[in-house]
């Protein structure tokens, strides 16, 4: 359901569904469920960090997915040291050389403003491979959303992933709509956080954007997680047991919910 136009931006006549994937298995489920684009991560329990090259290469070999790779060296915030920044540029180059269709990144200063010079450097690197530069949800902690969006447009960023600076995109609809109204002709807005088949259509209809980002997650148990005296459990947002994976059926349900309402997006 993804449509392209000559200027290289997404055509917003039909919704684009991007699935947040934590590995190779997730990517296969997203593909089989009907998605055409994923954000590829590792360690989604930490909010997503840089995936391995092995994972990227397998996904590109075995699917036709458009793959946007997360470039994030650690959990926590987005004000990076010189050493962390060096790693991010090295990783980005390697992922692009191995077929990444885009890089998702976010550079902030210690006052939570856009680190514009480092952002420009990353955009130049990504565009040098004819790939997409995506500023991820680091955007959701900047103090001036409108001014920051203008800066990202000026830097040449192709897309912003945002929840509208709220915990979930449903609550951020007013800001996402404002960003779309002001900047939608210059940059893509991708709504993410809490998106599923029950609300994706409403987010699109009420904001005017043309794409959503969803984890479509379910949980699977691993009996080796807990031993007699040792536990390797980790706390998820939903406090579910086991570990999260992408559910093919939830991907299908999300896409079906949007395809059923495409007459509203033309």
Image: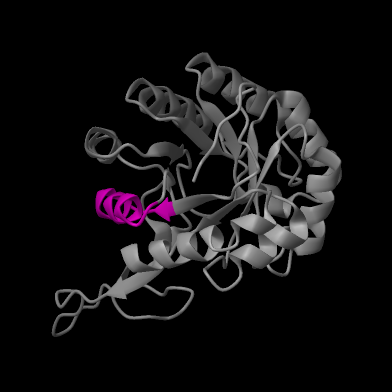
Q: Which residues are magenta?
A: 20-34
- Residue 101, image x, y percentages: 44, 30
Q: Residue furthest top?
A: 128
Q: Residue at x 62, y 42 (%)?
A: 79
Q: How many labels sit on residues? A: 0
Looking at this view, is 86 or 132 the one in front? 132
Name the quadrant containing residue 242: bottom left
Q: Residue furthest bottom?
A: 228
Is 32 inside the magenta-drawn segment?
yes
Q: Is residue 163 visible?
A: no
Is 28 inside the magenta-drawn segment?
yes
- Residue 250, image x, y percentages: 40, 68
In this view, 19 is above or below 241: above
- Residue 166, image x, y percentages: 71, 65
- Please give left or right for residue 161 compared with residue 164 in the image: left
Looking at this view, is 248 or 74 the one in front? 248
- Which color scheme is applied? one colour
- Please give left or right for residue 29 compared with residue 9 in the image: left
- Residue 186, image x, y percentages: 76, 31
- Please give left or right for residue 243 compared with residue 47 in the image: left
In this view, 71 is above or below 207: above
Q: Residue at x 64, y 31 (%)?
A: 158
Looking at this view, is 3 or 147 the one in front? 3
Magenta segment, principal secondary structure?
helix
């Amino acid at each position: 359901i993804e449509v392209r136009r000559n200027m290289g931006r997404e055509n917003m006549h039909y919704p684009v569904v991007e699935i947040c994937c934590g590995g190779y298995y997730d990517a296969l489920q997203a593909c089989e469920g009907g998605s055409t684009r994923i954000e590829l991560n590792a360690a989604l329990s930490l909010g997503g960090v840089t995936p391995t090259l092995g994972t990227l290469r397998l996904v590109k070999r075995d699917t036709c997915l458009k793959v946007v790779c997360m470039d994030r060296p650690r959990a926590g915030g987005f004000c990076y040291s010189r050493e962390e920044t060096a790693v991010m540029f090295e990783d980005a180059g390697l992922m692009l050389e191995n077929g990444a269709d885009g890089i998702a990144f976010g550079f902030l200063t210690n006052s939570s403003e856009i680190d514009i010079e480092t952002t420009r450097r990353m955009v130049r690197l990504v565009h040098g491979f004819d790939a997409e530069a995506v500023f991820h949800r680091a955007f959701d902690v900047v103090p001036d959303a409108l001014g920051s969006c203008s800066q990202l447009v000026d830097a040449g960023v192709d897309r912003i992933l945002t929840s509208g600076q709220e915990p979930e995109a449903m609550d951020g609809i007013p800001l996402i709509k404002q960003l779309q109204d002001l900047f939608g002709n210059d940059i893509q807005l991708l709504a993410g956080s809490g998106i599923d088949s029950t609300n994706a259509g409403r987010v699109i209809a009420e904001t005017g954007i043309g794409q959503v980002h969803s984890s479509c997650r379910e949980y699977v148990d691993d009996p080796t997680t807990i031993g007699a005296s040792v536990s390797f459990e980790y706390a998820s947002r939903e406090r579910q047991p086991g570990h999260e994976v992408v559910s093919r059926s939830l991907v299908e349900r999300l896409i079906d919910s949007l395809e059923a309402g495409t007459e509203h997006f033309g």
